[in-house]
Amino acid sequence: MTVDTEPQEPESTAMRFEVVSSALKEGTAAAARVGRLALPGRRPIDTPNFIAVTSRGTLPHVTPDNISKHLQVSGAYFSLEDFVEKSQQNLSRPPPIFSAPTSTNHPTPLYSFTGTPSHITTILAARRLPAVPSPIGNSTKSISVFTNTGFQNLSTTDYLSAASTLEPDITIPLADLTNNSPPGTSPTSKRALRMAERTDEWIADWFSSPLSTSTSTFAPVLPIPYPIQWEYLSRLAEDYIPSSQLSGLAVHDPDIIPDLATHQPSLLSLPLLSLSNPSNPHLILRHIAHGTDLFALPLINAVSDAGLALNFTFPAPPSSGSPPLPLAVDLSLPSFSTSVTPLSKSCTCYACKSHHKSYIHHLLQAREMLGWTLLQIHNHATMSAFFGGIQRSIKDATFEDERLSFSRAYDSEMPAGVGERPRMRGYQYKSQGGEENAGKKKNKPAWQKELAVEDDKVEVPETDGGRELQEKGVGEVVKGSGR
Amino acid sequence: MWATARRMASTTRSASSAALTFELVGKCSTTRARASILTLPHGQVNLPIFMPVATQASLKGLTPEQLEATGCRLCLNNTYHLGLKPGQEVLDAVGGAHKFQGWNHNLLTDSGGPMLLTPEHSMSLQNSIGSDIMMQLDDVLVTTHPDKARMREAMERSVRWLDRCIAAHKYPERQNLFCIIQGGLDLEMRRECCREMVARDTPGIAIGGLSGGEAKDDFCKVVATCTEQLPELKPRYVMGIGYPEDLVVSVALGADMFDCVWPTRTARFGNAITKHGVLNMKRELYAADFGPIEEGCGCQCCRPVGQEGSLGITRAFIHHNAAKETVAAHLLTLHNVWYQLDLMRQAREAIIADQFPAFVKKFFVGLYPDGQNYPSWAVNALRGVGIELLGR
Ligand SMILES: [Zn+2]
Ligand SMILES: [Zn+2]
């Protein structure tokens, strides 16, 4: 057997997390820290850091060869709901991912089905990030998930069995989340209490079931106040840390971390993964200041789809009282049409080494898919460099000062981005009432305009006949280009 | 090996013009198929060749680096599209289309079509693009146009426009201008056009106006009629051709270069081109098929897991994401481009080894495994150059 990844302790079969350096001062509750998370067979992740967020098993717009060659990302978030839709032609077929054969290069079904490079740490959760709200509530033993073919129930036992089969490096067990309340509102205290009780029961079920030892469990920490979920959290600390069954926490709102530090300090020996979907780097820094180690960042995918190139560094460049800098450059703006400079002067990513703003502006204008690919490469690289700077400043004990300078140097929010987004797909939003119009508006132009037409017309058969049907289309295109 | 090398050396003949060298390295002893090396300002390409179409200076989601990895060294841009976006001013400011898209290999541009109105405007735009091969502006009618007088007028206008293009072309020392043979399905008119065009001595010659819906028999007759008339030591480009059968038959008829949007366009519809025909990956049939897109294919997606650069992509994964995530389209595009380039590589090797007729038969058996139902146009065209598909 040949392993071509970076050197690591070959004997280790368990996840290891160590805090290398912490800004923790005498008497402070929670603080930024530098650590290293290592899973057997994977590239170790220096923390604080981020993991990429996949959609249907792939990092949007980036093929696996480009992930290996051009991204420093060492972890990826997968959602089970992206793989378990019921086939409309074959209702009884089990989700194919469960039977994907494995190999040395693709050691689990999750790797082999998705083609994810094996140095990437895989993290499985039930729902996409961010999840599409479900109008159907959860029940005592299941949650409602949204697939490409609609809502369906996912029971705790089904999820457990899926995790055992897929063998992700890290699994986040089910949480009872309110996924139908409007964003920004918190659940009623009665509902919040039930969320905590159910999640507590589900965790007990989870740990009492024989689960493959090759997956590490990151228990959810609910986005509700500490006092409402204290029983659940104390059980995590008192039962599952001593039993070594709990490997980390998946925190839905990192603002709870100071409370954990006060009431359940042992939980902070675990790596803390944030699922809070921060909308800007200032929030990321704030959560790092609490002690968050890892972030799943759907923000990056959204920023790339909006035609934005991230443009910030940590530490921030020295400012001399100048107005705050924008956090990203909007490549759709016409002013970039003849700009032959890279997306960012300091960036060394593939997109910045090989291309310039003028070309990426053109690709966005022409709705060529490569535009989003290059932005994804650059935006992930910028985020990697940002976290690298954070790690160094924590080690140098300059993090808090630099965080303050950063907050002064940059705008507080991302620009919106005037460009047209890629076509939204059914699994990305729910068509319902007002949202339907929003979805339609988002979809104005299609990245596969011809496809939409073609799809309505015919399922292309395999024989010559199918091509004859297309031939007319080809002829039209050819004529249009002056043959 | 030695014998082959000697024979090649003795038959190698070449011709050069200011920005191009054409070197004939092998000829099929049965058909009119040829293998050659075309040296252009941005490097050498082996003919016969399929050229993928990067309409708007981008090949459907592939980075230039990924396109290069398929072995592609010559691709197309569309002049009309680049004239609209990014526009001539931007191209001039950036320093041409190679720099603009980060592509250090060869580019071919079409004329931009009648939308550009004048030969001078077409040349000016293609000079700004800086393509290694430029096409003359021609007057294109669908080959099935019923009006013979109008067809003649278009053919004669195309000849006159070539003269204007030659006069307007600013950089003949670094960009090659190809003429385009017109004349619809009228073989006599095509012959006349060949004579006129050849007399103008452009570095390469295209056969135009096809792929507009004419019968395949007629298409083959036009290609065969033209190649018969054309000088041996110049590249011959049949425009707008991309189906694998069309490529193989056209090579047998003596053509060298082809382009078409179909292989990359069809990838976005979830279609994979294989030696056994086109497979639509969206079909339920492939949902749990963990084989490669095409068994035996050497592309990055399909090459066996463990081989250098293998991605281990399965049909099941393509099915899962076809028409959903752009990545599925990128991967199928990688495969389809590889398939088309590899088909021409194999044809070339067969020509050099003088095994081309066997290659053609094997290719058609792959598509029609029962050895029957061969398309009659292909049977007829190949019979015309000495290959009997139906013969056992
Ligand atoms: Zn960059
Ligand atoms: Zn392939």
Image (spheres, coloured by chain):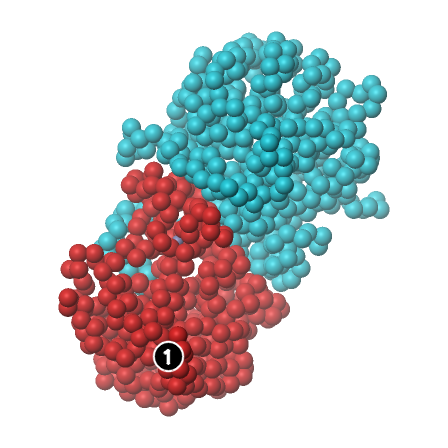
Chain colours: A cyan, B red
Q: Secondary structure at mark 1?
A: helix
**Image position, residue A300 (x, y; %):** 59, 41
User: What residue is shown with label 1?
Assistant: B3
Image mark 1: chain: B
Q: Quadrant of residue B333?
A: bottom left
**Image position, residue A239 (x, y; %):** 60, 11
Q: Quadrant of residue A17?
A: top right
Asked if residue A140 lies left or right of residue B239, the reply is right
The residue nearer to you, when weighing B42 against A147, is B42
Q: Residue at coordinates 28% horizontally, 79% vertically from top-left?
A: B29
**Image position, residue A236 (x, y; %):** 61, 14
Q: Quadrant of residue A138?
A: top left
What amino acid is labelled 1 in the image?
Ala
Q: Is residue B337 above or below residue B41?
A: above
**Image position, residue A22 (x, y; %):** 77, 28
Q: Residue at coordinates 36% horizontally, 44% vertically from top-left?
A: B291
Q: Would you say residue B207 is visible in this rendering?
A: no
Asked if residue A391 lies left or right of residue B368, the reply is right
The residue nearer to you, when weighing B263 against A411, is B263
The crowd level at tag 1 (other Cα within 10 Å; few <14, some 14-19, many 20+) is few
Q: Residue at coordinates 51% horizontally, 38% vertically from top-left?
A: A54
Q: Is residue B226 above or below residue B314?
A: below
Q: Would you say residue A120 is visible in this rendering?
A: yes
Q: Residue furthest bottom?
A: B199
Q: Residue at coordinates 39% horizontally, 44% vertically from top-left?
A: B314
Asked if residue B184 lies left or right of residue B160, the reply is left
Work out which quarter of the rendered image holds the C terminus of chain A and state it.
bottom left
Asked if residue B58 lies left or right of residue B143, the reply is right
Q: How many marks?
A: 1
